[in-house]
């Protein structure tokens, strides 16, 4: 019997498996696909950098990927820019992270897990899970259709947005307040910054939602749009739609004027959710399998890896003490951390919030606190929490009283006085 079975070889799964292996636990990991494979979510946060060091992969990432030193927010027409350099965080920490090709990045983490002693089985899909009193039993099917059973004392579901165990137990709850869609692709030859700013992620504020512009190595740029689904008005977010939306955004049209699309146009919808329970007596949900938040602040990989470290510690303690497992602390940490970021993300879809974000105050060091949150350094920090509460309070006042210059087009779109996405 293994100490732990991990479902999923993405960043959360490979992280929790590696950490358990580093603690001398016997771990087997099942990944349904063969790596490398395409995945979205290419912009990482500085809070992940110490985790990369502990996993033993930082030197590889330094060699392969572009450094990201800041996040910048740009108005629809490009007339207003606000840059948040990570080096100006309130609580210090790494002043950079990486912009990554996820196929390569995820493969680095999964290969590292195997090198650290995890039994990694790619092309193996878990088809059935049984939770027993003293452990778990899973049935696995390989690419040739052969099946086998495996047992372990604990199960860690890191199966990503398909959230296998949460789906089977009826735990997943969609977030009605973030009923959004995303449409995205890759380009070569897009205009980009130079020097220390080359790796900055750019968040472009469209009237109805936002765009990401993520520079990658080898002149590749990831571009995607996220907006509330209601603004589609029955349209399909296909290639034609994607091209029209780029052309209608002056800032983005300029940056992509000489670029060539080199990948399919892909779309995702209704993807913000959370699980009612994060852990049971013999199982834990890790990363996107537990919850997924709209990606405006690029939290997915970072929170998944942080959760992987927390989950590994919780399972290791349970294995060491031999008593009835208690994962309540892990459950609370995930819910509190996801909740803190979800509230900030929801604020982003209101004009008054974005107006304050584009004109942040240095009073009470609010700008530096927001920088810390954007760097992924907020979890567990009361000094960041109360300042972000103050920021949200100022945004609520700004809804009525003009504390900052107005983003007129965004206000009109949110109020319904502007025509919907074309």
Image (cartoon, grey):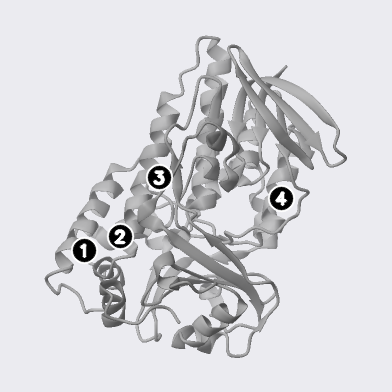
Specify which label sits upstream in the sequence, 3 or 4.
4
Q: Which residue carries the number 3 mark?
A: 338
Of pointers 2 and 1, the one earlier in the residue sequence: 2
The answer to whether the residues at label 2 and label 1 have Cβ atoms under 8 Å apart is yes
Which numbered disc, 3 or 1, marks the residue that appears first in the sequence?
3
Question: Mark 1 or mark 4: which is in front?
Answer: 1
Q: Position of residue 58 (x, y in %)?
A: 63, 50
| Mark 1–mark 4 CB contact (< 8 Å) | no
Disc 4 vs disc 2: Cβ atoms closer than 8 Å? no
Residue identified by numbered label 1: 395
Q: Is residue 411 above or below residue 336?
A: below
**Furthest-top residue in view?**
323
Residue found 50% across the figure and 39% down from its top: 290
SS of the residue at dot 4?
Answer: helix
Q: How far apart, in angstroms, are the residues tagged by discs 2 and 1?
A: 8 Å
Residue named by callout 4: 108
Residue that badge 2 annotates: 347
């Amino acid at each position: 019997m293994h100490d732990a079975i991990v479902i999923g070889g993405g960043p959360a799964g490979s992280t929790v498996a590696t950490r358990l292996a580093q603690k001398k636990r016997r771990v087997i990991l099942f990944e349904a696909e063969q790596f490398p494979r395409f995945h979205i979510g290419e912009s990482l946060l500085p809070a992940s950098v110490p985790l990369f060091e502990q996993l033993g992969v930082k030197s590889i990432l330094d060699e392969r990927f572009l450094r990201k030193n800041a996040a910048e927010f740009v108005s629809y027409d490009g007339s207003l820019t606000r840059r948040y350099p990570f080096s100006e965080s309130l609580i210090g920490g790494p002043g950079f992270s990486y912009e990554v090709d996820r196929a390569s990045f995820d493969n680095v983490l999964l290969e590292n897990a195997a090198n650290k002693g995890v039994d990694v089985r790619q092309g193996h899909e878990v088809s059935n899970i049984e939770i027993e009193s003293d452990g778990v039993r899973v049935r696995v099917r390989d690419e040739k259709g052969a099946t086998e059973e495996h047992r372990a004392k604990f199960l860690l579901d890191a199966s990503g947005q398909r959230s296998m165990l949460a789906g089977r137990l009826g735990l997943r709850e969609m977030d009605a307040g973030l009923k959004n869609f995303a449409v995205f692709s890759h380009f070569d030859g897009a205009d980009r910054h130079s020097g220390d700013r080359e790796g900055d992620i750019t968040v472009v504020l469209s009237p109805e939602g936002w765009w990401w512009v993520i520079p990658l190595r080898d002149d590749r740029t990831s571009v995607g749009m996220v907006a509330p689904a209601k603004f589609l008005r029955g349209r399909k977010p296909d290639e034609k739609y994607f091209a029209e939306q780029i052309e209608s955004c002056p800032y983005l049209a300029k940056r992509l004027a000489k670029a060539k699309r080199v990948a399919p146009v892909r779309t995702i919808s209704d993807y913000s959710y959370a699980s009612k329970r994060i852990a049971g007596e013999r199982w834990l949900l890790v990363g996107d399998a537990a919850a997924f938040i709209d990606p405006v602040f690029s939290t997915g990989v970072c929170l998944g890896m942080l959760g992987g470290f927390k989950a590994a510690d919780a399972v290791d303690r349970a294995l060491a003490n031999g008593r009835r497992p208690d994962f309540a602390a892990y459950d609370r940490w995930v819910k509190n951390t996801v909740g803190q970021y979800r509230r900030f993300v929801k604020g982003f879809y209101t004009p008054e919030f974005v107006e304050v974000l584009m004109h942040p105050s240095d009073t009470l060091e609010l700008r530096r606190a927001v920088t810390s949150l954007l760097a992924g350094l907020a979890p567990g920090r009361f000094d960041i929490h109360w300042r972000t509460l103050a920021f949200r309070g100022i945004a609520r006042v700004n809804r009525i009283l003009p504390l900052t210059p107005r983003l007129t087009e965004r206000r009109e779109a949110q109020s319904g006085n502007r025509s919907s996405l074309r």
